[in-house]
């Protein structure tokens, strides 16, 4: 019930804001929403409970309606129309027609947009000293900028967190164009302004306003440079409902010696007395996986511009192959892009018009062994 | 997608992977040098020969590293015929990195307290990867007759 | 009771049930599809708790790559002109990808193949099998001549893509020595086959428990050259195992390259216990344990074509060198 009242409260706040424009959302919220409930003197992990309710401000994505009775020739005709609508010249109103937005230089504190990529799998590469290491391949496939929300508007959103202030805007990015008949009308309407086909996956990146990209702009792998470091977020594999042995690595109980029916159970759940009872955050059976996992500070070793592939360090990116991952510039202070190093950094993103010469198909890091090179003769 | 007779015939010899189907003790299969692991002395020291004659292999009673598992080039403390001796590991049965040889026996070379080898000849090949290490192990390498 | 509730209570499941029943009214369901259904049946709860795939299947991804709506990324070209000879996959097994369909990806495999063929253009990795006698030269900074040569019999060959490797075994000064080499490691300077032959088994790890003479090979051995166009010979040698203890229970592996073992009753019991006769009839398992035949011909055709191009390039460069001399 609490969630519902919060939702209705936010909706009313938004509507009033459009009228008055002077008050903030937090002043309109009831005090019980903004205050933090006191907990015991222990910090609990926040990821224990899976949110059972979807975000109320998200529109419904998929539709169950289908044109099942279309004959084959009609189906082909509809597909032709769709392709012509989105790839034909000037069929859809694209915001890019009005000319590009103003481009700013990279200054200290700038946060650029990221891209959505598909995890393809892992393989091995070698350094010039002959040492082997694992890399993960990420493909940046069919990415478009869908929308930009300036900071002052974002501050009124229910998803806005107070500590962010009015520093960051939202860049909404989508990946993998689809047939619009798969989605609901409300979801399709999100892509109307950008003039691109509806996307299978949508995400948002917090950016500073000087790095805003115009909606409708395609993003590709040249957004990043070889040798830079990125943060990669993805969802772990979904294991469904699992017991404590698999989920938390508990020991279980012996197979024999009088143990009955509790070989894979957790045993005691806590003590009695003053601090008795089951504390919040107790490791118990439940739904395992499908959680966001972040890998910080992964180096880009190699880029393939033909297939839009990034080779990043390590086997640790979560999820099975063909999971969606969010790739953005790292926030680690020592590895963050500095103003003096940002000479050839694409800002706010890479445009094909910038390049005078055709870009090479493959870009390598200096320390990476290229397989066209002669064998490594170790000298020291 | 059709499963043809030809393809079935080709698949019939299912590739058999060696290795234990089910094992609970990892130290056995990993062949790690832990406490009480039995070794083989490969130098020509008198005490090593005497131990080999009576058929009592030396046993590891301490590994001088933080992990307490002996790897190539590590120093260990062994008991030989009731005496405590220090030794260096110069060959392992354990799975090794690429280009590093894996031996059929766990080999050690005995040294005294100052790090000088007790014998004056080593009878088996020594991994070439050990030559990268410095320190007392260079004294052992000078006795070696062959590197692989 | 539960079915009636389903229809009346506005929920996702209520909507689905209404598709078949046009008479019932589900206006409420259309409005509020986010309301939680507190009266879910056991089946619905189990459905909600099951693992959901948060990844795309590879055929969906391929469809997106080939879609006309997708622009900016090239799709992988399929080789259709040439065809490789049959059983070419036994010559270069590492070019076949991992058979597990969840870990397959066309682009990744293509890029890996590209790297492997580039490396093969630099050094010559000849055709070899388990049982062949090989010599490998690796870079070693401390060795005289800065290189370390090892000769031995190939007892294992596995790994896919750039992870491919093989294991050589030999006896040096009365001690069995095995070295694992990665095939595409840049520190491997040369690979040569001294004697090309096959053995009766896929892996020869049982040589560890055999007399040392079976795995002893001369380091200065002269290469044995087969007549042109001849088939790869199979060495039908049957080795004799040492008495126990063994590395593994060899009697359970159905080995063809060893002399018959005198089985004890305990061994027979173990063989019966560990045997899996149903695997011979499990067609689905066989189907999944191998790359599909059509895909195999596509991959091998590409490799065959590229390999021929590399070989012809090498021939012309060698001829040019001879002329210069």
Image (cartoon, grey):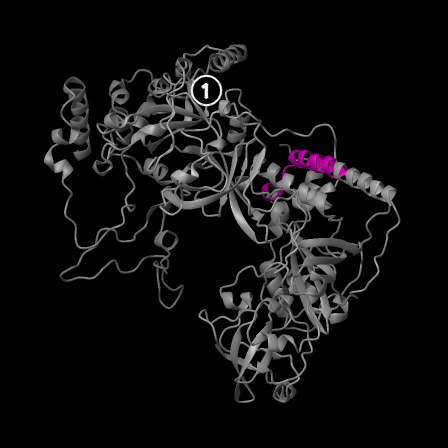
Q: Quadrant of residue C22?
A: top left
For disc 1, the chain is A
What percent of the width, then of the height, locates residue C290?
63, 42
Q: Main secondary structure of the magenta part?
A: helix
The front one of C276 and A151 is A151
- Percent coordinates x, y for residue A106 in the rendering: 38, 33
Left or right? Give the position of A94 relative to A35: right
Assign a secondary structure to mark 1.
loop
Residue reaching furthest front? A340
The answer to whether residue C147 shows anywhere in this view is no
Please tell me which residue is depicted at 63% across the width and 57% down the height of the picture.
Answer: A378
Give the left or right position of residue A121, taking residue A272 as reference: right
Q: Quadrant of the C terminus of chain A?
A: bottom right
**Residue occupying the far left of the picture:** A31
Q: Is residue C75 above or below residue B33?
A: above
Tell me: A296 left or right of B53: left
Q: Magenta segment: does it hold C287?
A: yes
Q: Height in image: C149 above or below A179?
A: below
Say if A301 sits above or below B90 in the image. Answer: above
Q: Is any atom of residue A197 visible in this view?
A: yes
- In the picture of the structure, the residue carrying the numbered disc 1 is A179
Count residues near mark 1 (Cα–Cα under 10 Å), then give few for <14, some for 14-19, many for 20+.
some
Q: Position of residue A341 (x, y in %)?
A: 43, 39
Q: Quarter of the image holding residue B120?
A: bottom right
Q: Image quarter for residue A95?
A: top left
Judging depth in this view, the residue of B17 and C142 nearest the camera is C142
Q: Residue furthest right?
A: C227
Q: Nearer the viewer, residue C187 or B20?
A: C187
Provide the residue span drawn in magenta. Answer: C284-308
């Amino acid at each position: 019930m609490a969630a519902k009242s919060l939702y209705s409260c936010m909706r009313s706040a938004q509507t009033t804001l459009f009228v008055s424009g002077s008050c903030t959302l937090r002043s309109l919220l009831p005090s019980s929403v903004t205050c933090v409930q006191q907990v015991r003197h222990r910090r609990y992990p926040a990821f224990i409970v899976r949110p059972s309710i979807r975000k109320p401000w998200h529109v419904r994505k998929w539709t169950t309606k289908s044109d099942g009775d279309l004959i084959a020739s009609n189906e082909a005709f509809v597909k032709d129309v769709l392709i012509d609508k989105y790839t034909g010249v000037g069929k859809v109103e694209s915001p890019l027609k009005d000319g590009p937005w103003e481009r700013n230089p990279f200054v200290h504190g700038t946060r650029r947009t990221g891209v959505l990529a598909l995890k393809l799998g892992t393989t091995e590469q070698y350094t010039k000293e002959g040492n082997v290491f694992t890399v993960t391949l990420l493909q940046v496939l069919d990415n478009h900028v869908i929308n930009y929300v300036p900071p002052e508007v974002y501050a009124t959103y229910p998803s806005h967190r107070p500590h962010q202030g009015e520093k960051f805007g939202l860049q909404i990015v989508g990946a993998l164009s689809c047939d619009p008949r798969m989605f609901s009308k409300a979801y399709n309407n999100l892509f109307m302004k950008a003039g691109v086909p509806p996307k299978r996956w949508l995400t948002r990146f917090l950016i500073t306003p000087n790095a805003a990209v115009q909606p409708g702009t395609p993003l590709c792998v040249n957004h990043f440079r070889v040798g830079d470091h990125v943060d990669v977020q993805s969802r772990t594999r979904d294991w469904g409902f699992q017991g404590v042995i698999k989920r938390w690595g508990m020991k279980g109980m012996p197979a024999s010696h009088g143990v009955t029916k509790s070989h894979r159970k957790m045993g005691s759940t806590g003590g009695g007395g003053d601090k008795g009872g089951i504390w919040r955050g107790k490791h118990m059976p439940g739904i395992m996986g499908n959680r966001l996992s972040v890998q910080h500070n992964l180096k880009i070793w190699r880029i393939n511009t033909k297939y839009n592939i990034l080779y990043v360090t390590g086997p640790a990116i979560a999820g099975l192959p063909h999971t969606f991952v969010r790739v953005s510039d790292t926030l680690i202070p020592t590895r963050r892009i500095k103003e003096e190093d940002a000479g050839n950094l694409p800002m706010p993103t890479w445009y094909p018009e910038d390049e005078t010469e055709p870009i090479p198909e493959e870009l390598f890091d200096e320390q990476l062994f290229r397989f066209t090179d002669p064998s490594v003769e170790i000298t020291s | 997608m059709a499963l043809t007779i030809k393809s079935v015939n080709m698949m019939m010899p299912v590739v058999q992977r060696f290795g234990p189907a089910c094992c609970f003790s990892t130290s056995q299969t990993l062949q790690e040098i832990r406490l009480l692991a039995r070794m083989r002395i490969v130098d020509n020291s008198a005490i090593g020969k005497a131990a080999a004659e009576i058929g009592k292999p030396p046993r590891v009673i301490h590994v001088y590293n933080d992990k307490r598992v002996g790897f190539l080039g590590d120093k260990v403390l062994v008991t030989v015929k009731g005496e405590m001796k220090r030794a260096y590991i110069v060959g392992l049965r354990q799975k090794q990195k690429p280009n590093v040889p894996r031996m059929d026996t766990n080999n050690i070379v005995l040294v005294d307290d100052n790090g000088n080898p007790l014998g004056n000849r080593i009878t088996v090949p020594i991994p070439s990867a050990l030559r990268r290490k410095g320190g007392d192990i260079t004294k052992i390498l000078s006795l070696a007759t062959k590197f692989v | 009771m539960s079915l009636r509730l389903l229809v009346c209570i506005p929920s996702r499941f209520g909507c689905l049930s209404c598709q078949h029943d046009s008479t019932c009214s589900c206006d409420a369901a259309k409005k509020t599809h986010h309301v939680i259904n507190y009266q879910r049946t056991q089946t619905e709860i189990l459905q909600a708790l099951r693992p959901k795939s948060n990844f795309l299947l590879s055929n969906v991804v391929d469809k997106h790559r080939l879609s006309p709506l997708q622009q900016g990324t090239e799709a992988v070209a399929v080789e259709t002109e040439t065809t490789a000879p049959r059983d070419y996959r036994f010559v270069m097994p590492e070019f076949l990808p991992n058979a597990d369909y969840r870990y397959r990806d066309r682009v990744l495999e293509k890029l890996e193949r590209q790297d492997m063929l580039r490396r093969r253009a630099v050094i010559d990795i000849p055709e070899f099998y388990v049982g062949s006698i090989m010599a490998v030269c690796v870079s070693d900074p401390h060795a005289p001549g800065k290189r370390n040569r090892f000769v031995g019999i190939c007892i294992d060959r596995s790994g896919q893509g750039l992870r491919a490797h093989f294991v050589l075994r030999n006896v040096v000064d009365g001690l069995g020595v095995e070295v694992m080499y990665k095939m595409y490691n840049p520190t491997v300077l040369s690979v040569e086959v001294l004697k090309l032959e096959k053995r009766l088994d896929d892996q020869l790890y049982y040589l560890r428990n055999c007399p040392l003479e079976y795995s002893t090979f001369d380091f200065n051995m002269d290469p044995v050259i087969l007549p042109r166009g001849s088939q790869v010979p199979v060495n039908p040698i049957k080795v004799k195992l040492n008495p126990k203890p063994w590395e593994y229970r060899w009697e359970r592996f159905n080995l063809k390259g060893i002399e018959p073992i005198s089985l004890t009753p305990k061994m027979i019991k173990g063989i019966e216990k560990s045997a899996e006769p149903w695997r011979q009839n499990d067609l689905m398992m066989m189907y999944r344990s191998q790359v599909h035949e059509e895909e195999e011909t596509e991959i091998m055709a590409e490799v065959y074509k590229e390999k021929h191009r590399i070989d012809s390039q090498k021939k012309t460069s060698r001829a040019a060198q001879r002329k210069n001399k």
